[in-house]
Amino acid sequence: MLGQRLEIRQGQSLVITPQLQQAIKLLQLSNLEIEAFVEAELERNPLLQRDEREGDREADKVEAPAEAADARELEFSGADAEAARESVDAREDDLYGDSSPAERAAEAAAAGADAGGAIDWSRTGKGGSIEADGDVFERLSSREKTLSEHLNEQALMAGFSTADHAIAVSLIDGVDDGGYLRVSCEEIADRMGCEVERVEAVLARCHGFEPTGVMARSVPECLALQLRERNRFDPAMACLLDNLDLLARRDLNALKKACGVDEDDLRDMIAELKALTPRPGAAFGAEAVQAVAPDVFVREDPAGGWRVELNTDTLPRLLIDQRYHARVASAARSETEKSFVSECLASANWLVKSLDQRARTILKVASEIVRQQDAFFVFGVEHLRPLNLKTVADAIGMHESTVSRVTSNKYLMTPRGMFELKFFFTSAIASSDGGAAHSAESVRHKIRQMIEAEASENDVLSDDRIVEILKEAGVDIARRTVAKYREALRIPSSVERKRLLKAAC
């Protein structure tokens, strides 16, 4: 029989307070987003004001050696201490796994290849989706995609290894609005600690990106890339590109002699050049010139090791105007006015403490990352070690979700260039002899070296043979993983490689 009744039950539940939500939000914001948030708080809360004492910045600089990451804790007292620590170490299912962003993209590319055959991701167009919500999605979708964003999307989907993706990103950072590369391969190689040949190989793959001709180092190279795509790059056209100065002077007789063609052929060749795009990047939206400011600096310590310090220029400096608070508090008459003043003071106190805790947490996480990846800073990109969130979280005594938030949209300026904190997280492959795990990047590099050493069709290694060789070297890896890495590197199967080597002979 159905009926209605009143019933009282007692239970426990976890409630996220507005202050806790604010602290979690502050931790994952970039320095630009923090600046916007602080501006809004300054307008809303009359008790907050900026600390304009520039002379104290050096004295207040927060810094620490990488070896002493555990020793830096914010000293609060009583309930404030517990609330502050809980605010930046709340558990939430927003974690990413062992893989870095580039590795997850490579795995996605490999999965796509398994589903529908070999896919040339370097030819990926403008397609894609943005998984965002609220104002973030509206902000991103309200403007035209920039050339840098378009190239970075293709780099993620091109199947680069972690090291090669880092090189590709550095190359893309050197592309101007017209689509031309304004940084030399030697400079990138010196910064990344790798060979110039490797940078040039990555650049060659980037030349397959759209729009065609992008990342060229000169106008002739840009036009040559477009002509190759149209299958119209022949010796005569190459000679014409080498003598563009003659074309600019309209010296047609000299051009005909240099190219070895008659007047009609030269006229057709010039018409083909006019149909090309000398500025392939001009079709994309202009990006506001706003350099990414690093959140943390890593510098060599004269005494040895590395020093890790926060970029104080990106840290909001706020003060609570106690005099103004005393004046308005004494003038408050109604309960509403008293409540408003009290809430403003509590909000201001919490914001100042949360910003301080955020800064120290970023420093703590960055210091541990530097300690874990010290070989990268000394020897270069090939020496990245396997690293995941749990390793860092356990080392600094925080939850993985906290590390995940801290590494989101935060950048580290190092002697080798600027990197996002997530760049330093690479997956691990177990050792067959029980020793230290191997970095996925180093395993991919070994696979590439073995395949590049194949001189004839009789030397071609199958995926099973590669597994055997790697296991003899102490790498415990499955055949499907070798196949996935090979496809991510865009290396053909053993059957296709045999056919190519046989045709070459």
Image (cartoon, grey):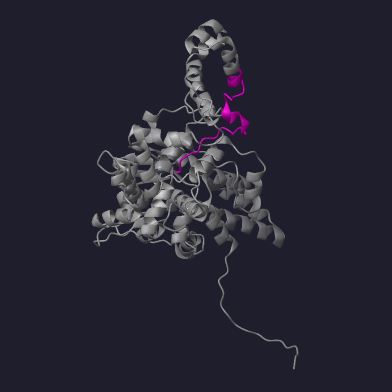
- Residue at x-position 42% and y-position 37%: 202
Q: Where does the image place residue 108, in percent across and percent down from the top left?
A: 49, 53
- Residue at x-position 39% and y-position 32%: 200
Residue 36 lies in quadrant:
top right
Residue 343 lies in quadrant:
bottom right
* Drawn side of residue 336 relative to residue 345, left or right: right
Asked whether the viewer can see residue 51, the reply is: no
- Residue at x-position 33% and y-position 52%: 462
Above-or-below relation of 432 to 120: below
* Drawn side of residue 396 relative to residue 432, left or right: right
Asked whether the viewer can see residue 136, the reply is: yes
* Drawn side of residue 146 relative to residue 121, left or right: right
**Main secondary structure type of the part rendered in magenta:** loop
**What residue span does the magenta drawing correspond to?**
271-295
Question: What is the number of callouts on the image?
Answer: 0
Q: Give whichever of 504, 259 is nearer the camera.
A: 504
* Drawn side of residue 259 relative to residue 444, left or right: right
- Based on the picture, tell me whether residue 275 belongs to the magenta stretch: yes
